[in-house]
Image (cartoon, grey):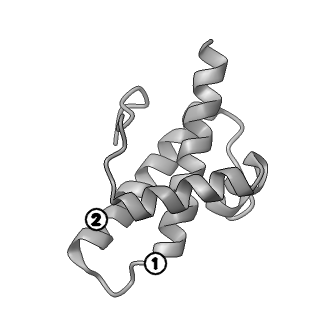
């Protein structure tokens, strides 16, 4: 995704993948989810972080759809959970 304002809403992914991401979201703190998604260094601005996570998620989803051997479902769950956390954060900031 190139436009920061374009968020895949609703996010259409397999039900089991989304359920796992929601469980991860409920089970971990937002900072922990973001550190895991970014490998420790989290962008300070929500929109910048959101853009990076959306790009990572799009790449992972492409790998999943193509059945590539380098697809990692656990990484996809982590990235989706971070995406959900950032969307929630942005939504709360807009309220």
In the rendered structure, the answer to whether residue 50 lies left or right of residue 61 reads: right
Which numbered disc flags the more N-terminal residue, 2 or 1? 2
Task: Reply above or below: 13 against 63.
Answer: above
Mark 2 nearby-residue class (10 Å; few <14, some 14–19, many ≥20):
few
Residue at the image position 54 percent from the left and 57 percent from the top? 21
- Kindly identify which numbered label has been placed on residue 10: none
Task: Reply above or below: 74 against 51.
Answer: below
Q: Position of residue 73 (x, y in %)?
A: 46, 74
**55 or 92, which is in the foreground?**
92
In the rendered structure, the answer to whether residue 81 lies left or right of residue 30 reads: left
Task: Reply above or below: 63 against 3.
Answer: below
Q: From the image, tell me which residue sits under label 2.
A: 62
Residue at the image position 77 percent from the left and 56 percent from the top? 32
Asked if the residues shown at circle 2 and circle 1 are in contact, with their CB atoms under 8 angstroms apart, the answer is: no
Mark 2 and mark 1: Cα distance apart in space = 12 Å
Quadrant housing residue 40? bottom right
Q: From the image, tell me which residue sits under label 1.
A: 72
Quadrant housing residue 59? bottom left
Task: Reply above or below: 40 against 87.
Answer: below
Q: Position of residue 5 (x, y in %)?
A: 41, 26
Asked which secondary structure carries label 2, the reply is helix
């Amino acid at each position: 995704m190139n436009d920061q304002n374009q968020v895949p809403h609703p996010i259409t992914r397999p039900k089991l993948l989304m359920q796992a991401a929601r469980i991860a979201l409920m089970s971990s703190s937002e900072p922990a989810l973001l550190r895991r998604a970014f490998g420790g260094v989290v962008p300070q601005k929500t929109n910048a972080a959101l853009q990076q996570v959306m790009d990572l998620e799009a790449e992972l989803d492409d790998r999943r759809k193509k059945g590539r051997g380098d697809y990692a479902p656990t990484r996809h769950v982590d990235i989706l959970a971070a995406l959900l956390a950032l969307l929630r954060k942005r939504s709360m900031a807009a309220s």
